[in-house]
Amino acid sequence: MPVTRQLPTPESADLVALTREIAAKELAPRVADAERTGTFPREVFATLGGAGLLTLPYPEEFGGGGQPYEVYLQVLEEIGAVWASVGVGVSVHSLSCFPLFSYGTDGQRARWLPDLLSGERLGAYCLSEAHAGSDPGAMRARAVRDGDSYVLNGAKAWTTHGGEADFYTVMARTSDDGARGISCFHVPAGTPGLEFDRPEDKMGLMGSTTATVRFVDVRVPADHLIGREGQGLPIALAGLDAGRLGIAAVATGLAQGALDTAVAYAKEREAFGKPIIQHQGLAFVLADMAAAIESARATYLSAARLKDAGRPYGREASIAKLVATDNAMKVTTDAVQVLGGAGYTRDFPVERYMREAKVMQIFEGTNQIQRLVIARDLAR
């Protein structure tokens, strides 16, 4: 069922309507097969890029959509409601462009951003390592200055679009000064020494390629350094605040898709002489699902509006990610329960929704890390 939205302009309402139309016509017919076979839908990202939906929160002067975050996130939610893998991919692409836009020089932005925001290029974000997931300050991947270049060595785990992206935003250690020894680099795909492991065989989001990226004497020019040496971790953490809102929106869309499926089934399936939605015990489950989704949506929009106003929003982003992803896990589990035995089969998408919801509680900072961020902010 269409979500009731309050959007700031007629243009933004048109963008959401366009997204819903593209999702129905281009995404919905492909999602089941792609998720079953683990096929990366690169052509879908080209379609979204061509419609101007891949880079909405960036300025028009660089080729972006010039939309506020509250609009971008609602577009992302509409995508996530139909195909979570694609929603996550759009969020990751936006995250991979963030360091260049926010910390790059005027020359770097003019040189790279129009191409990255054209919709024809897809990005990846290389932060986590196998031993340094929730503790990025413990990373070991290293970049050593050598004349007018840096030479990168090491590995980055859990990279969305690993092996599929056109560019990689990479955090690597440039000194042994702990968290202050990390720097950020722009690494184009095809750079010699850039290698990729076999994609992870995951529980869900099989249409989203996740792989370890390896750097074997990867040489990048010194002018591919984004920001200053040692500024990488603050850049990464600032980007994650925005990325957490993206995941909150996708999780909310995923939950909405599960609710829509459950309501449609409950209106058709009969027990004891009437549709099961008319039985109070099940109707209350659906009502709680709807309440959880509306709560998640309100939470991520509140954080987005703070961001759009230029105000601090880190704690609110963590709250939104925590609430939306925990609610998505509960809603999708309940959707399987509403469908009963049918929900446990692959004849309906709710079992896939439940598997996809699980990782939402893990990436972009586990929900335990979100609680830590929130608690530390409260203690200040």
Image (cartoon, grey):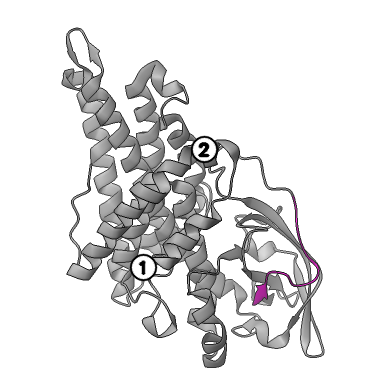
Q: Residue at x 70, y 71 (%)?
A: 172
Q: Magenta: predominant secondary structure element? A: strand
Q: In the image shown, does 174 or 22 lie closer to the viewer?
A: 22
Identify the element where label 2 is drawn.
helix
The quarter of the image holding the N terminus is top left
Mark 1 highlights which residue?
A: 313
| Span of residues in magenta | 183-197
The numbered disc on residue 33 is 2
Q: Do the residues labelled 1 and 2 touch (CB within 8 Å)?
A: no
The 10 Å Cα crowd at callout 2, few under 14, some 14 to 19, many 20 or more, is few
Q: In which quarter of the image is residue 51?
A: bottom left
Q: Please, is residue 151 above or below residue 125 in the view?
A: below
Q: Residue at x 39, y 53 (%)?
A: 248
* Amino acid at pointer 2: Asp
Position of 180 with respect to 246 (left or right) is: right
**Front tag of 1 and 2:** 2
Name the secondary structure under disc 1.
loop
Residue 186 counted in the magenta span: yes
Q: Residue furthest top?
A: 272
165 horizontally vs 150: left or right: left
Amino acid type at mark 1: Tyr
Residue 324 showing in the rendered view? no
Q: Residue 41 location, x and y as percent?
A: 54, 51
> What is the x, y in percent for residue 102?
48, 80
